Amino acid sequence: MSDRSHEVIFQPEGSRTRVQDGVSLLEAAARCGIVFDTPCGGQGLCGKCRVHIPHHAPEPNDADQNHFDLDELAAGWRLGCQTHVSHDMTVVVPAGSRMGDQQILTDGIERPTPLKPATQKITLSLPLPSVDDQRAHLDRLREALTQAGVNGEARFTPQALADVTDIFRGRYTERTVVLCEDTVIAVEEGDTRSALYGVAVDVGTTTVVGLLEDLNTGERLATASRSNPQTSHGDDVISRIRCCMETDAAVEQLQQSIAGCLNDIIGELCEAAQVAPEAIYEIRAAGNTAMTHLLHGVSPVSLGVAPYVAAFRESRVRSASELGIAPRSRARLRTLPNIAGFVGGDTVGVILAADMRESDRLTLAIDIGTNGEIVLGDRRRIVTTSTAAGPAFEGARIHHGMRAARGAIDRAEIVDDALHLHVIGGARPRGLCGTGLIDLVARLVEWGVIDIGGRITAPEDQPHTVPAPIRARTLKGEGGFRFRLFEASATESGLEINLTQSDVRELQLAKGAIMAGAHILVRKLGVSMGDIEEVLLAGAFGSYIDPRSARLIGLIPNLDEDRLRSIGNAASAGARMALLSTDVQRLADTISRESEYIELAACVEFQQIFMDQMMLTPVAP
Amino acid sequence: MSDRSHEVIFQPEGSRTRVQDGVSLLEAAARCGIVFDTPCGGQGLCGKCRVHIPHHAPEPNDADQNHFDLDELAAGWRLGCQTHVSHDMTVVVPAGSRMGDQQILTDGIERPTPLKPATQKITLSLPLPSVDDQRAHLDRLREALTQAGVNGEARFTPQALADVTDIFRGRYTERTVVLCEDTVIAVEEGDTRSALYGVAVDVGTTTVVGLLEDLNTGERLATASRSNPQTSHGDDVISRIRCCMETDAAVEQLQQSIAGCLNDIIGELCEAAQVAPEAIYEIRAAGNTAMTHLLHGVSPVSLGVAPYVAAFRESRVRSASELGIAPRSRARLRTLPNIAGFVGGDTVGVILAADMRESDRLTLAIDIGTNGEIVLGDRRRIVTTSTAAGPAFEGARIHHGMRAARGAIDRAEIVDDALHLHVIGGARPRGLCGTGLIDLVARLVEWGVIDIGGRITAPEDQPHTVPAPIRARTLKGEGGFRFRLFEASATESGLEINLTQSDVRELQLAKGAIMAGAHILVRKLGVSMGDIEEVLLAGAFGSYIDPRSARLIGLIPNLDEDRLRSIGNAASAGARMALLSTDVQRLADTISRESEYIELAACVEFQQIFMDQMMLTPVAP
């Protein structure tokens, strides 16, 4: 690589960065905090990261030519992920090409958690050293701790030892010892017990959510969230794992990327609640297995190849600053344990938040994202699995798919024989997000425009009850028919927005995978769908989904509405509970150790069930 | 400080370094590995760091003018410690101005130690992961460790976890786990059990000695030593502590300095024995309390002011690479515990090597250096103290004093009524080292040239048995008489070498302090000097001292020769024993916890005993 460097200016922000010749715009933008929307992982496939380079745009490549017409190419439109910096350039990034304005769910169900944090502050009054009492400072402290009924054998971190030498220079006799689990992480001057804070984080593949908690009161002081900047290395975990397979440096880059994101979040939390960053002593993080590995800087590559094995399962604790996180604090970072390959700490968080391990009610919890994690059980036994739901629900591989952001069609209703499409933010429509896709397909199945096998039927084959204006929107498309959602004149891009036959197939694959997983778990426990007393939908997607539509197309079991419950961001709720109580953390460890993981690839019946579950019909209880 | 920098070339090596304007030559030289001899701590007092700057020598200051005559100053002679770099310069450093050619004692008494190192290697044959066995790599390892009868709950360091992800990419099924105490520090491919090495180090104030041990056999493979480069911050611990009081940065500088020294030693050891640096898994270090603090990067300032309290007493373990030591290895560095303020891990090493804690014989151990550490006891009880013996035995504050290096007078004998002075290396004499000082004073006391009060008597007052040529060498000096050792024509510098009245006073202060300490310990145990069954002399000085001379002037108790024993570098021997066996390490911890420290400053009788013990007479048993 050449050692020439170039300046790139991103508009409309005017952010500048200097990068080496050949660096992709994706990476250059990420350095300015601008994250392109790249559901395809920056492979030039999805065409979402459109950018405008008004002057001296580099030569377009094949991917550019696939996504832009000649006029656009001539005007300087390119795919951000395909363009490499070869000279100083100014790049305009339209709002629609960016991540970061989608709905982020920060709240999860709250279960009252008795306060018993792993970190405690003990204030001691210590005699000054004298010729008659020449004990080493540390021995003096240890003995006072033992007298105070605290473990005097605790390990002191090097930083805590440095505190000891620093503050013992003064004539103060009152010190506060900060003990996290069995380690003294700080020794402070005077009585500082009133300042004791922790952060719970849900490290999602797409979004990262942080909660600031007062560990003295259990009160939540602030919430903050960010897009996960690792998205510049790929939208889903598989793309990021692939990056790590390709270059060893990627693990470190991804680790630094998420560390920077957590620092931004912690900075915002502290600012909002007027808490000093130094007063944060604990960070509890929940993420899927790959996110947990990357947060610790551990290579996730073995998760990317069969038999998909994690490097570690257990809850791991580190000094956060050693990971580049909260460097001004003494905080310890602990991740929730994983269960297996693709059933991670976020699922453990869901099980905690849903109280499954301590409940008598047979509960099915579904966390739908790029992967679908499915958990079934109660206090006696918990079985889990993970299915490659595919990125359909995140808007990827859907012709006009997009995330649930401004301009996304997120709901479809039938009112007086007319189809009403709701667009987020009241904007001109830009595309179709996951909840909109489900609603829309459900409505079209109700009318018979789509049959239960998933085929968009020809206008002439549609039931006579289908209103004429709807029928008129069923048009010839590639590989079958398409259904027009908006005409070109109504959309932001000036192009039609359609639901295509292949979009319906993607949805069928995704929902088939999820329901097949649920069926396998039900068989494993020797129960039936009807025995399930509660179905919990976790995650952002689960919160926005219309349960009626989901039941109708068989995305979730067809149970009474009162057995269905959305539990929101249960991963962060679980992380928060573990932060507030060591009892909950211990429960998390038990869940991690004792929950069973069912590998669908090893189930001979999976293929058949999967085929059955692709049908767009309700799942019989 | 200006941001200009200058080049300095040191001759005769021709070593070059570039330093900021205003940096002292002492520091510039240290960067080239050239350590000036500065017993005064670089304060311009001792005049030992003479350097020659042939061109453009900076203006001399008062200290230069005190140590050189006008011709020398005009020729460009200056004190290295007083000269600051203000332009590019070439500096000639004569051999006599350097540290580094003195005798270094690397051997201590050896006690057979049953091999039981803290580090063990366990080779495991592991089943490959499969769809039917998707346990995380770490769980797979832990279970195999448990089956092998090893603690499966051991903590894995982040590096060991990285190993796991690295080597599990291969199809190897055999791995070797390196377990140090309760921590897995590495996981290696194949069966690597034959490579298991450790290093024991004695971190002395003046010299650092390292031993390379094969932990599979207990065999010593190599020995290496260096001058402690911290000497550029002062010759004794007090000067170095003072540096740390003056600037916070000094702690880090001193830590890096000793880390670099250990790296040099480890490099030499590995080279000599053809051992890969990666195969070193443990470093066991013994040093005095201040050296131990600095090795860990912990400020020793509280040791520098009354009541002289250490930050920590206990044995501390760190990843060596975190301390900048052996960065290519996974070695853990553990320091021997201290006992109290100035009774450090080196003294614990002496107690271990001398087997005092497990012996029935009442033993007195004396470690004479700048500080004198004194230990008295047996298996029932051990008492210790430390006395400011002063630097007389290291040649400081002695008019023509020097370390035991080439050109030092190290022995004095009477043969046929003539005084024979032995010079190290057969060179022209340069000065008087500690053992020579003791021998010489003992001879002159025997003749009566010096009386038992320590006064050099006038020639006319000397006993008639004193031979005339000896009497003739007693000359008028400052504050009394001086005794001429060599005439100007015979010496390297072309100047007379004398023993002055104040030199004898320095010796009296030193030996008075040591014997007063021993007396206080004897009283503390309720015994008498005659009850002592063994007197052990530790350290380099103890090895070279003539016991007859030492007994005669009362530097050690006047016991039969068969009760006296020199135990050499017992600190490194003790560190080695702790390296070879966790039982010995545990014993060290017990010694540290249970040995009593007697603060002489708190003993009302100390002053009187000290005055008594300044007499140059044998100590009555």
Image (cartoon, coloured by chain):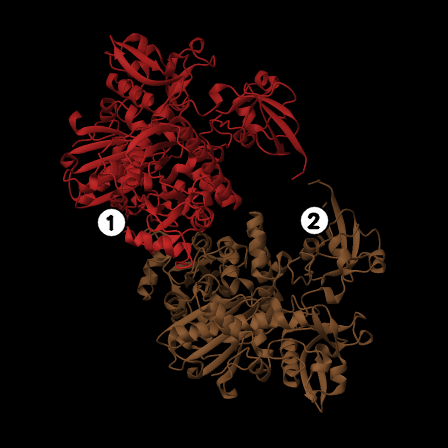
Chain colours: A brown, B red
Whether residue B157 is visible here, answered yes or no, is yes
Q: Nearer the viewer, residue B599 or A332?
A: A332
Q: Nearer the viewer, residue A56 or B594?
A: A56
- Left or right, A423 with reference to A177: right
Asked where in the image residue A142 lies, by quadrant, the reply is bottom left
Residue displayed at 33% across by 14% down: B422
- Left or right, B255 with reference to B369: right
Mark 2 burial class by Cα count in 10 Å: few <14, some 14-19, many 20+: some
Residue displayed at 83% across by 51% down: A56
The disc labelled 2 sits on which kind of residue? Val
Mark 1 burial class by Cα count in 10 Å: few <14, some 14-19, many 20+: few
Q: Secondary structure at mark 1?
A: helix
Whether residue A114 is visible here, answered yes or no, is no
Say above or below: A202 vs B148. below
Q: Nearer the viewer, residue B446 or A172?
A: A172
Q: Chain of mark 2?
A: A
Q: Which mark is residue B419?
A: none
Q: Secondary structure at mark 2?
A: loop
The disc labelled 1 sits on which kind of residue? Glu
Residue displayed at 36% across by 28% down: B223
Say above or below: B527 vs B434. below
Q: Position of residue B486 (x, y in %)?
A: 39, 12
Asked where in the image residue B382 lies, by quadrant, the reply is top left
Q: Position of residue A462 (x, y in %)?
A: 69, 83
Q: Which mark is residue A23?
A: 2
**Alpha-carbon span between mark 1 and mark 2:** 64 Å
Q: Quickly name the residue at label 1.
A: B594
Say above or below: B298 vs B544. below
